[in-house]
Image (tube, rainbow, N blue to C red):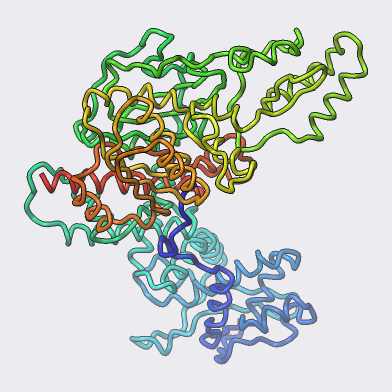
Amino acid sequence: MGGDESGGESDSFDWNSEDEREIENFQSSSLRLTVPNGAVLTGSGEASPSAGPSNSKVFDHFVSMGFPREMVSKVIEEYGEENEDKLLEELLSYSVIESSPQPQQRIEPNHCSLVLESPHQPQVKIEPDLSSSEGGVSSWENSDSDALSDEEEMTKSLRGSDNIVLTLVKMGYKQDEALIAIERLGCNSSVDELIDFIGVAQMAKAEDALLPPEEKPGISKLNKRRYYELEVLGRKRPKSCEKRIISEDDDEPLHLPNPMIGFGVPTEPAIIKHRRLPDDAVGPPYFYYENVALAPKGVWQTISRFLYEVEPEFVDSKFFCAAARKRGYIHNLPIENRFPLLPLPPRTIHEAFPLTRKWWPSWDTRTKLNCLQTAIGSAKLTERIRKALENYDGEPPEDVQRFVLEQCRKWNLVWVGRNKVAPLEPDEVETLLGFPRNHTRGGGISRTDRYKSLGNSFQVDTVAYHLSVLKDMYPNGMNILSLFSGIGGAEVALHRLGIPLKNVVSVEKSEVNRNIVRSWWEQTNQKGNLIDLDDVQQLNGDRIEKLMNTFGGFDLIVGGSPCNNLAGSNRVSRDGLEGKESSLFFDYCRILDLVKNIMTTNQ
């Protein structure tokens, strides 16, 4: 439902092409060969063809890439020819050591010597030629066997980190920045993590230079830094920074409440009647954020951290309707004096669909449906179930019952005839989710699109219960900024509560969903203004400020960013808040910060 990733969001590196350029730029001419008889050979660094497996295709391959023959021979002899990636890594590591003449790096000259042994010739020692460097350094002294062993051990320990240093320097970063990043994150960190660390450090320095010296009343230093980060610098939070934030407190698993009734539901007594919000979270403007409760480890801690440390409220919509829908909500709304939509919706399958009672077998003990998904069971599946059941006059055996119940629970199948099950119709899903009948029907919208749109929507009765506290606060109506609007679940909830919608800015990527919201707006004869936009990533500070100046700010910022990379049903790209779609959560935070800062400044 969210927008595509912004092309300028982060630098992307073609690692293969970078490797090729690094190899092409490798210099193999500055080598001195010292043999035991004292003779010194200076030249291109190419050894005699007899030095190593010169008849090997792997050997010829690496020599043609520009590596010295002695170096290739030594590495192949040590590691074999099977793993070319390993050979290339070792060759590059040796190259890094030899091409690093700067004394301030941790590689000392006497640690760069490489001893090449071959059964066909005397021991050969490869040393960098420093005669052309500043100071006219001559050839290095030979070390005894113990010293050589120490040198090789230290060389191996430094090899990985210095290879990374050279890679970062070739990308244009300063050597001291690279070394600091490695020191902070560790030698095992990936290149992209180091790049993001350096980027964050550079961004912080730039922020400090741009921040005005005096504090404006009502704007905290933290909020000012975030405002400048997002709008003056035009930067987004780097993904690896998000990764580190996500992993900081991951050791503490999130324990979801059981029963999952949040701060209370209409049919259960409230567990928490009062709560204290952090100062930065106090409204107005009010905000309301929703996503799946069963997210990967650490996700909700991160969401809470970015939304002013507000505690999540976890609610299962089975306490509001006949279908489960476990969701987490972070908001700064009051929790006293809530009230539900009336009449209360049916809370069991048979109450919602009484005609199914006639055909419901006694061994199917379901009273609630599972979470309503974006897809439905196929006709082949329902036919397979019918044939499996028709083989028995009475109750089928336990293994058949188990198979049928498993499929019915998975796909929310209901009984519509003898031995016949079927998926819910779109209008039945609309009823369960609290939308008006035919809310998603018509206007060229396909049946498949209807299921998809409904599966990604709010459960209206649940959301309305939370938003009900706004009715007495805004008797004359509200200005709403609806991000990732979907099919307008928040707008429908406010309308059903009797809260006038004065101005609604609806941001939704899907044209199908935008058409559904527009159609509902017209069908319900709304008196206010509906402005629909298609991409949250294009909603910048200037655009928001113009909209706010038009009608005086927003009273509520509501939305739920895509759950594609959070949902447990996603076994392919369940990447948490780093995923392509679910990372749009940070755009919700960005826009919320902007609205709060602009409103504070205008006051």
Q: Is residue 29 left or right of residue 180?
A: right
Disc count in the image?
0
> In this view of the protein, which residue sits in the foreground, 563 or 510?
510
Residue 57, image quadrant? bottom right
Q: Is residue 207 above or below residue 324?
A: below
- Identified at 52% across, 39% down, the residue is 566
- Regarding residue 85, the answer to whether it shows in the image is yes
Please name the residue shown 55% across and 34% down the image. Answer: 438
Q: Nearer the viewer, residue 27 or 145?
A: 27
| Res. 580 in view | no
Quarter of the image where one finds residue 430: top right
Q: Where in the figure is residue 259, as x and y percent of width and height?
A: 48, 14
Q: Vertical placement of 24 versus 377: above or below?
A: below
| Residue at image coords 93%, 18% | 391
Front residue (pair 370, 445): 445
Give me the residue at 56% from left, 35% from top. Answer: 455
Quadrant of the frame with the C terminus: top left
Give above or below for 103 relative to 336. Answer: below
Query: Residue 295's x, y, as percent?
Result: 51, 33
Q: Is residue 471 left or right of residue 495?
A: left
User: Where residue 344 sits: x, y (%)?
Assistant: 46, 14
Say whether residue 223 is left or right of residue 74.
Answer: left
Across and down, in percent, residue 278 comes to: 23, 30
